[in-house]
Amino acid sequence: MNLENTNKYKILAASIIFDAVGYASFIIPGIGEIIDVVWAPASAYLMTKLYKGTAGKVGAAVSFIEEAMPGLDVIPTFTLMWLYTYVFKTKTEETIIEVN
């Protein structure tokens, strides 16, 4: 799965779809727990593929915990991560200091 050059709006669409899959445990009563057991590690893996670096790893851990814990499935983890990555995160500028 190569998502390095993917348009940020395609990543947003994928994030919304992945969040909707996470809501399936509320939509389908009775088998929601089974879905959560399968979806928790899958969501963590997908989070690391969509969002690189430390933020992706932290997002994966949060996504796994959120999907594994009963009642927390309502948190749109993938969409929040997209907002953090493309809206709220500021670009850091490198400062070069010359030493004589």
Image (cartoon, rainbow, N blue to C red):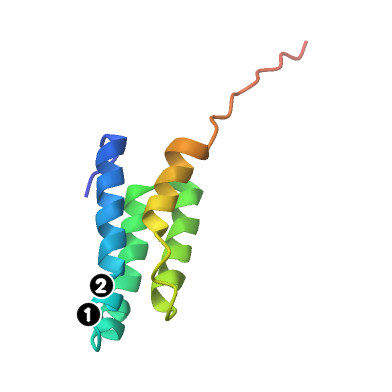
Q: Residues within 10 Å of mark 1 (few under 14, many from 20)?
A: few
Q: Is residue 63 left or right of residue 25?
A: right
Of residue 97 and residue 1, the one placed in the foreground of this image is 1
Residue most extreme to the top: 100
Check residue 11 in the rendering and tell me which mark sits there, or answer none: none
The residue lying at 65 percent from left, 18 percent from top is: 96
Q: Name the residue under label 1.
A: 28
Residue most extreme to the right: 100
Q: Is mark 1 on a helix, strand or loop?
A: loop
Q: Is residue 42 left or right of residue 87?
A: left
Taking 18 as reference, is 39 above or below it?
A: below
Q: Do the residues labelled 1 and 2 touch (CB within 8 Å)?
A: yes
Q: Residue 67 at what x, y percent from top left?
A: 39, 72
- The amino acid on which the numbered mark 2 sits, given as a three-letter code, is Ala
The residue lying at 26 percent from left, 78 percent from top is: 35
Q: How many marks?
A: 2
- The amino acid on which the numbered mark 1 sits, given as a three-letter code, is Ile
Of residue 37 and residue 99, the one placed in the foreground of this image is 37
Q: What element carries label 2?
A: helix
The residue lying at 25 percent from left, 46 percent from top is: 13
Q: In this view, does 95 lie to the left or right of 57?
A: right
The residue lying at 39 percent from left, 47 percent from top is: 51
Could you tell me how far apart the alpha carbons at marks 1 and 2 are, in whole angstroms?
6 Å
Check residue 24 in the rendering and tell me which mark sits there, or answer none: 2
